[in-house]
Structure formats: C-alpha cells, structure tokens
Amino acid sequence: MDWRPWVDRGLTVGRRLLSTNVSTVEAAGLLHGMASIGPSFDKSLLPRTTIQQAGVTGTISAINYGLTTTQQSFLETVADRIVDFEKLEGRPLAKRGIIFAADVAAVAAGMALERLLWQRPDETLWRAGLRTAAHRSAAGAAAGALAVGMDGAFDALTRSKTPGSVNVPLVMTLGAGTGAAIHFLRSRRLLDTAADTDQYGDPVRPASLVQPVRAMIVGGGLSVALYAGSRVESLLAGGIASTVRWAIPSLSPAAGFIGHATVLGAAAIGIERTISYVNDMTETAGSAIEPAYRSRPVSPTVSGGTNSQVDWGTIGREGRRFVNMTLTADEISDVTGEPAMDPIRVFVGYESAPSPNARAYLAMAELERMGAFDREVICVYSPTGSGYVNYVAVETVEFLTGGDCAGVCIQYSVRPSFLSLDRVGTAWEGTLALLTALAWKVRSMPEDRRPRIVLFGESLGSQAAQDVFEKEGVAGYDILEVDRALFVGSPYASKWRRHWLRDSASMDPEGIVVEVDSPADFAALPDDERDSARVILLTHGNDPIPKFGPRLAIQRPAWLSEDDRPVGVPPDMRYWPLFTFLLTGVDLLNADHVVPGTFEAFAHDYRKDLPEMVRRGFGLEADDAVMARVERALRRRELAWAERRVVADTLDDAEKTLRAKLDEWGVDHKVVPNIVTPRRDVEPDPYGTDAVVSSPVP
C-alpha cells in the first residue's frame, strides 16, 4: 500500500492549520482565553476533581474570550469612528498602530481607574463594580495589544502583508505560555497531592489529584462548546432579525435586539421549565417513604406515635428519620450511667398543615400533649431545606440532659437547600410563630418551672432562624425567651449575620454573639467573652457556604486579606475578580462529604465539633469521661442507622424483583410474607464502646 498520498494529505492539512489566520478581534479573545488556562488551576477553599477543574477552565476561558472579543471590537470601532480607517487604505502599518495605541490607552486608563478606586471598608457596590470593570477592561485591552503586536511581529518575520489578522497557532502558543507563566509566578502548584486536615489538624479526605492534561482537554472542549453555542445563538438571532426587517420594516432599528431577546427568552423559558421539573422530582424524592422507616413508632413521646395528632403520612422522609431515631431512656442510661427518661421529639411536616402558622399551632399542640413544658430544655431545631436535622446535635442534647428535653422541628420544604432558597420566607415565618407561641407559654408558667428554650440551626436552617431576629438584633432573643442559640455553617445570605459582622458593636453591645471555627477556638476566648456568649456561630474557615455571595464577584472579601485569614483558608489562595466567585461556587459541590460513622470537622461537615459545641453552647453539664462515651455512641449510632437503611433498601429492591418475577409466572405473590421485617437487635458497638443501642432495623 502506498502511504505517500496519505502523508502528503496530512502535511497539507497541517500546513493549512499552521497558516490559519483570524482577525485581531478574535485573536485578542483567543489569546485571553488561552492565557486563562493556567490561572484557572489556582487553589480555592477546597480541592477540585478533574472534571470540575475542566469545567472551571472551560468556563473561564469562554467568558474571557467573549468579553475580550466584545471589548476589542468596541475599541476598534471607536478608533475607526475617530480616524476613519477608509482614509488609511493602503497604509496597514498606520491602521495597526492606531489600534495598538487604542489598546494601550485602554490598558493605562483601566489600571489608573482601578488604582484610583482602591478597595475601602464598607464601600458601595457601585465603587466595587467600577473597579472590577476597570480591571476587566485593562486585562482585555492588554490581550488586544498583544494580539495586534503579534500581528505586526508575524508580518515582519514572514515578510508577509496580512494586516488585521493573526496566525492562530502563534496566538494560542503565546496565550498558553502567558497563562502558565502567571500561574507559576504566583507560586501555584499544578498538582496538589497533599492531604487536607480538619480544624483539629487531623487528616481527612485526600486532596483531589487533578490531571492537568485531561482537565485542559475537557476544558478546551467546553470552551469550544460554549463558543459554538454563542455562534448558534447569533445565527438564530440574525435569522429572526432578518425576518423582522422583512415583515415589519418599521421595527428594523430594533430587529437585532428583538432577535437576541427572542432566542435568550426561549432559552430562559427552557431553563425555568427544567428547574420546575427538577423541583417536582426532588419534592417527590423528599416525600418518599424509605423501607427502613415504614413502621410507625410506638413511643407516646414522638410525632407519629401513639400519643400524636400529626398525620404519619405527612412528615416525609426526614420526619420519619427524625422521630424513629429518638433515643430511649435505657439507651441514654447505658451511655451516661445515670437515670434517664424518654426524650420528646415533635416533627411537623410541610404537608402536615397548610400554612406556617398552622404548622406552628400543630407543633405547640403536640408539645403540650406530650408534656414538653415539664421538661428541662425545649430545643427548637431549624432544619435544612429537605427537613434534615443533624442527628449528632439532637442526640447530644438528649444524652446530656438525660432525656429531660423536647426537640421540635417544623419543615418548610422537602427539596435540598440549594433548591429551597425560595422557601426561606416560609421558614422564618413558621419559626417566628413557634418561638412566639413558646415565649407566651413559658411566660405564663411559674418561674421555677419554666423550661429553657434553646435554638439550633444548620446551613439554610441557620439563615431561616437568624432572619427571625433581623429587625430586633440580639434583643430579639430576650423578647422570644431564647436562652441560648447555636448556628452552624450559616449561609452568606443570612442578613442577620452579615449585619453583625459589619457592625457588631452597635448591634451587640453586650457581646452575647461570638463566631468561632471550633470548640478549641471557643475555649481560647477570654473568660468574660466566653461567659457572656449566648449566641454562637460555628463557621469553618474553609466552608464555602458562609462565603459564597454575589459581592465575591466584584470585591475582595475580608477572609482573603493578606494579614488576617481564618483558619482553613489556604494561604496561597488569591482574589481574582469575577472568577473567585466561580471557583468558590464550585467549592460548594465539595463542601459536604459525609462518611457515616466517621466524623470530620472540614468544610460544611460539623459533626466532629457538634458534641462539644452543644455542651458549651447550650450550657449542658457533663464531664469529659461522659463526653467521650457520648461521642463514641454517636458515631456508632450513625453508622448503624446508615447500615440498616442500606440493608432495608437492598431487601426492598430484592422483594420487588421477586414479586415481579412471581407475578410474571402467574403465582399469587400476595401470600408471600414481607421480606423486609420491622425489627431486630443490632450487633455490639463496632467502635468498642460498652454502650448498647437496640433500635428498629430491617
């Protein structure tokens, strides 16, 4: 076989690729996009996977390409209007020089404006936005100046005359080299193989080993896909605009706008429908009955039990978990070595009543029916979006009070937190109604018989609970008779927390609010500050949820200052306008990596901190030996419950398969007893504690 024709054909294609030219406008965007690849590997709060890195690289490159081509086109249009390039016909060097001068002037103006608008404390969003725009303009113009400069250099070296166009391989090589130089000059490592540690310095999950070549290839593909999408949008918009000009000539001046608005509007409708579909699917999943929790509890001290008026079918997946996992008096005594009683747990599901006030009323009726106001502590739990309440916090309260407590939770959504942002108003309305009713009830009781009301919130639940006190500040805790509060992983969107961080002196003159990243950090506070603390914000330095907000796109946050960074924020993480926002958004995907029975204090996982913080935050007495036994029992219980959920799901799937097969054979499978049995005893503690827990398992 003669390979020469194929070799010649390959060489021809190669020569064409090497000689491909693009306009200076596209060259500027391409150069800036390629230069973004290196810095896109900058470290953020948490390690990224290869696929996530590829997405980041592709998105940043595509954004830089789009913004820079738009800016370069604008600069060249302005230069044309001022000089009139038609008069420079036959004088390519003059035209090129004018465009280069416009780019250099834009770089100088952008840098000067950025320097003039240096960041100030409590600056306005307008100032921060203008500074970011100036930075963005200077960077884009610098890419344009390099592209125009390469155009001239390439023509000089090759003695060709291709004014206004740049060789593609050359611009891509220079762009990639520039990005790599920026990345390594910032002392970044392309691969981070070090193990991360939690707030205690203990190693946790290893950092993701990002494969740079794979990430760059996938990222490049994503950039091409985004660029292709923009071209398709332009073609569709152009077709619609042409139709408008032909059909309605009077709208010709607005035809371009109508075309783009129509295409983007259709895309927005498609996105909205997709989100609606996802919401419906997650609500169905959140209300689904898990095989491990089909059986209604027999305890008279929990919702859904023998003394409850809450419809068992309305509390959903998380409600069934919450009430089924309640400790018993024997389980508490086995761990603490002290007499105990059965704790009370009340859960009112989103579907248990039609409105926030009705759900609060139902919760109060449940508390009174079960004798909650005769207990030492009533803990109000503000759940995450799905209705989840951290089992470690709930069980710690029950262990340390000897069961002399009542926990109450009102569900406001059955979706995950990121899909429940539209329910925060419903959440704080229900929490306010419940706390108000509790306050009035407690005030009506003799002082020596009043239970202490404490408040716990995690993640979106923290925001929902804190927003109750937005207008009253810290005075609201006294108004609503809240003795202590513990908020874990509070989202950036919490207005109450942001107000406190911005002006703690006026909002909290008595110093009852503190923010710490661990129990050790709380213990290290001065004695008077620690003793006066009634509201504790527990926030890990590397938790992106309290940090991810829109200001991050245009303003360097305090936690990225050079001098005073929280524990957990990488020392080599730098602020990058627009794209630090994107990188922190990707960190949200990696913030909550939970392994049952293995407690960590890392990112948005606070299980390792919670036993000690609940003890200190709620003022519950327990010696160190009891705490050690409690923590072992908490780990064992979490693992045991996770195991029984997996077993129940597996057996349920097997049962469905078996019954389907019997039905296929024409066998009456209704006479076959259920495979998933309601109860059996668990094995001894795999963590070696002497405590024994016997709970319902499949």
Image (cartoon, grey):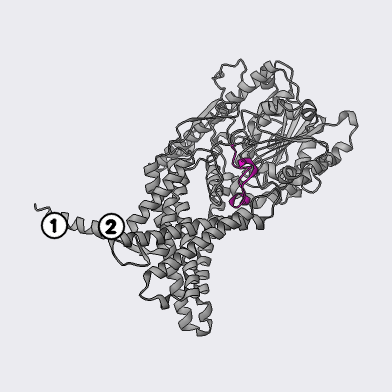
Residue positioned most to the bottom: 249
Image location of residue 594, percent across then percent down = 54, 33
Pointer 1: what residue? 5
**Camera-nearest residue between 528 and 336:** 528
x 78%, y 40%: residue: 365
x 60%, y 29%: residue: 199
Q: Which span is picked out in magenta?
A: 542-561
Q: Quick check: 285 above or below 270?
A: above
The answer to the question of whether label 1 and label 2 lie on touching residues, with beta carbons closer than 8 A, is: no
Image location of residue 675, percent across then percent down = 49, 32
- Judge whether residue 218 is colored magenta: no
Q: Quick check: 593 above or below 236?
A: above
- The image quadrant of residue 524 is top right
**Camera-nearest residue between 585 and 403:** 585
- The type of residue carrying mark 2 is Leu
Q: Quick check: 108 above or below 582?
A: below
- The type of residue carrying mark 1 is Pro
Q: Quick check: 342 above or below 136?
A: above
Query: From mark 1 to mark 2, how far is it between C-alphas?
Result: 20 Å
Residue positioned most to the left: 1
Secondary structure, mark 1, is helix
Pointer 2: what residue? 18
* Magenta stretch: dominant secondary structure: loop
Residue 642 placement, left or right of 336: left
Residue 629 seen anywhere in this rendered image of the structure: yes
Instruction: Looking at the image, tell me whether mark 1 or mark 2 is earlier in sequence order.
Output: 1
Image location of residue 556, percent across then percent down = 61, 47
Binning the other alpha carbons within 10 Å of mark 1 as few (below 14), some (14 to 19) or many (20 upward) gives few
